[in-house]
Image (cartoon, rainbow, N blue to C red):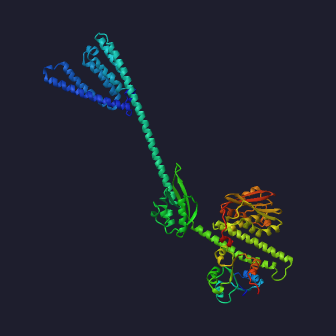
Amino acid sequence: MSSLIPNFLVSKRNDPDEIRRRGLVQVLSIGLLVLSLLAFAAIVIYLVVNPDEWQQDNLLALASSVVAFIVSAGIYQLNKRFSGLASFLILLLLVIVPILSDTAEQVVNGRSLFLFTLPIAISSLILIPAASFLFALLSSIVVISLSLSIDIFPNMPAIIGFFMLALVSWLSARSLEQALNELRSINANLDKVVTERTQALAESLDRERVEAGRNQAILNSIADGVIVFDRKWNATMANPAIKSMLDIPIELISGKNFSEIIEHPRLQPRSRGLLYAMMEHETQPIGFRIEWGGKTLSVSAAQVYNSRNENIGTVTVFRDFTREAEVEKLKSTFVAIVSHELRTPLNAILGYAEMFKESIYGPMNEKQVNMAERIMKNTQRLLGLINDLLDQAQMEAGKLTIKMAPLRPAELLEGLHSVMDKTASDKGLALTSEIEDSLPETLNGDIARLQQILVNLVNNAVKFTDKGSVNVRLLYISHNRWGIEVTDTGHGIPEAEIPHIFETFRQVEGMTTRVHGGFGLGLSIVKQLVSLMSGDIKVRSKIDVGTTFIINLPLVVTEINERDRRTS
Amino acid sequence: MSTLALIVEDDEDLANIFAEALRGVGFEVEHVADGQVAQDRLKAGVPPFLILLDMHIPHISGGDLLTNVIKKEEHLAKTMVIITTADARMGETYGEMADFVMIKPISFVQLRDLTSRLKPKDE
């Protein structure tokens, strides 16, 4: 049905312009309804008051008001479904009513002429804007036809006025519609933006919730105990693992200051000191050990920074290290026992061999003495090996410590010569040494460990040198560094092997244990000892020219006091 | 003066070697392998001129013998003590109370040379 009606007459229920127009038509039709009712009532009252006025004219007016009422009601109803059609009819009514309600002269040239302006002006509001031209045309036709029917010249200014009014109506209605359209599109955009923002906000909230949930789930399920502290070391978060690890209720952790937590009596005093140091110095230690109750815990701490790079707190992670600590202790005990058990019989072998060599039980011939010497030498090698293993084990367990005391560099070289001179001369090598003049006469160091470093390096140099010399120099590097340099004229180390020579149990390819009697622990121990002394070691080597090891150590100049002199 | 040397050492071979070294320089040698026996021997009987004291011995440790017997008994005041141990830390701990500390492995020649210097001069 709607396809038979011109487009602008069809009701588009969701078109906001249509809704606006329908509202106007509704008001208009109700207005007409009321108007026709009032007209009817007024005519009836007039006729009752003046019974002699019952004439054709007045009866016609009465009938007109009834017709107007019925038509208005019809339009009102029609407007509900076909507002375009209703608008059209109401406008048509506004055109027809003046024609019927006045004389032709008055309509085309008198008092009723202005009534045609009503449908023209209203049409652009309740139909499409251009409809004003349609009604200007319609009104013009009516005026021209009526004029011709009574033989007068059509009122041309009125007709031009109709079209001028149509133009003005059209323009104003059009701009009104455009303004409304723009407003609507702004509104729609605004709605869209609000919807998008709301959705984005909801999504990010969701994500955050999921993220937070996941983080919490991770924290809750890991075996490590975690406590998160704010800038002032108040615990803001703790996971369930920490509760069982420290065996204290979570209320004694959450919200409490770190200093309160570590006042717990179960914490060993030395461990408390370590934790205080961590808190006060804001260090970020990784895996230091504390004793809590019967447990050994490994503690790591990391400071947390926000996007503006401000420190916002610290995350501390506690790991139960009890089992590992036991194993380590067991291992070091095992190594200690084994090395003791190995050393005792080796000492006996060494002693008996010496007794042979010293001809304690009667004279020995040269070959027998020689054999005794071989036994002694091999036993010494084995003993050296056990010592290295023991040192290595102690270093791995972190038990080997450096004991600093004043020492004279000259002492170091004296000790070295007494141990290594024979080894070098047996191989036909010269072992020479010198001390740089600028090196202070006394300095701080662990004499036993420095001696061990020197012996290991010289032993190594002798082992890999067939002719020439091994030279040891003690160097003054700067006001706070001193050094040890050991140079040989030996085989040299292939460049590719240099990065690996300090590894445990490593010997350069092609120089087998059988030939050189080494075991590859010596250099590893030297490197670790140097590190323990906060120094570093470098190596320079050229094949068939020789190798130089340079150790760089912190220099602390001291004086040997009287007590030290007596005991040393 | 007595030239008696008491060897407190639970390893038979080492005791043997030490004894041979000490005899070689003219000491009379007595050997005990047990802490308890050593304590009984030290509390009664002739005070030795020299004790070679191992730290790891059964029943009573060398450290306890040194602290509670040798340093307490009046008649042992003049007795010289040489600690023999494989554990350098033991040597550090008890070194102050002893005259010498020898870290194992102990060389026969080294022990012989040291004790020959300590031995009382023949009158």
Horizontal side of residue A494 vs A306, given as left or right? right
Residue A36 placed where, x, y %? 23, 26
Residue A552 visible in image: no
Q: Quadrant of residue A323?
A: bottom right
Note whether A117 is above or below A195 in the view shown: above
Q: Nearer the viewer, residue A62 or B71?
A: B71
Q: Quadrant of residue A367?
A: bottom right
Circle count? 0
Q: Nearer the viewer, residue A486 or B104?
A: A486
Point out the residue furthest to the bottom here: B45
Residue A321 placed where, x, y %? 57, 66
Residue A415 placed where, x, y %? 74, 69
Horizontal side of residue A134 vs A498, given as left or right? left
Where the C terminus of chain A falls, by quadrant? bottom right
Where the N terminus of chain A falls, by quadrant? top left
Residue A267 visible in image: yes
Residue B21 placed where, x, y %? 76, 81
